Image (cartoon, rainbow, N blue to C red):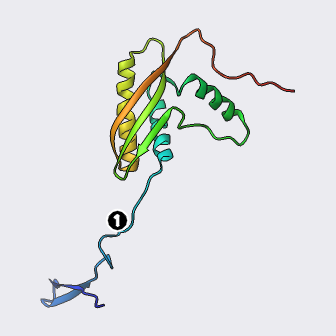
Amino acid sequence: MSETSEQNRTQVPDSGTEAVQTRRPTSRGGGAPASRGRTTIADGVVEKIAGMAARDVDGVYAMGSGLSRTFGAVRDRVPGGTKAVARGVKAEVGEVQTALDLEIVVVYGVAISDVARDVRENVIAAVERMTGLEVVEVNIAVSDVKLPEEEEEEPQTRLQ
């Protein structure tokens, strides 16, 4: 296999002579480095990104249904357990596109349509920016409303 190089002739100032510069190609063996190989993104990665983006929106109290939030609160208190960032998010990831289903709880008094729009915009922007995937749809299900007089949904810790 022979390697080709490009030669550029440039005029050297002050001397009036020509100098030959040799430039070597930056990529070898099959195109640009960025196009060699394939990147796959797991559903869980997209779910975490979407979950974080949705929680950042004002008016979103929590993610997931009541039962999943209860189990998640217990799991969060277990030493060594991880916080369930992807709770309430389901992603279907293809090679270049993704679709998301979110289940949210909104704060009483906010316009649900405005919160849903803001969540959709924030999630799409975050997922597309971080993954390069095209978000084809974000379906939002509002499963509950957090009323001001409701207590926090944290389980009581019992010592035995």
Q: Residue 17: give x, y in percent of width and height.
A: 14, 91
Give above or below for 41 relative to 23.
Answer: above
Q: Residue 128: give x, y in percent of width and height.
A: 36, 44
Give above or below for 92 relative to 31.
Answer: above
Residue 56 seen in the current view = no
Image quarter in which the N terminus is found:
bottom left
Q: Residue 139: give x, y in percent of width and height.
A: 38, 30
**Tag 1 residue:** 34
Q: Residue furthest left?
A: 16
Q: Does residue 114 appear left or right of residue 78 in this picture?
A: left
The total number of labels drawn is 1
Q: Residue furthest right?
A: 160
Which amino acid does the dot numbered 1 rest on? Ala
SS at badge 1: helix
Q: At 87% across and 27% down in the image, what residue appears?
A: 160
Residue 21 in which image quadrant? bottom left
Q: At 53% across and 28% down in the image, what residue appears?
A: 64
Q: Does residue 52 appear left or right of residue 70 in this picture?
A: left
Is disc 1 surrounded by few (<14), some (14 to 19) or many (20+) residues within 10 Å?
A: few
Give above or below for 127 relative to 60.
Answer: below
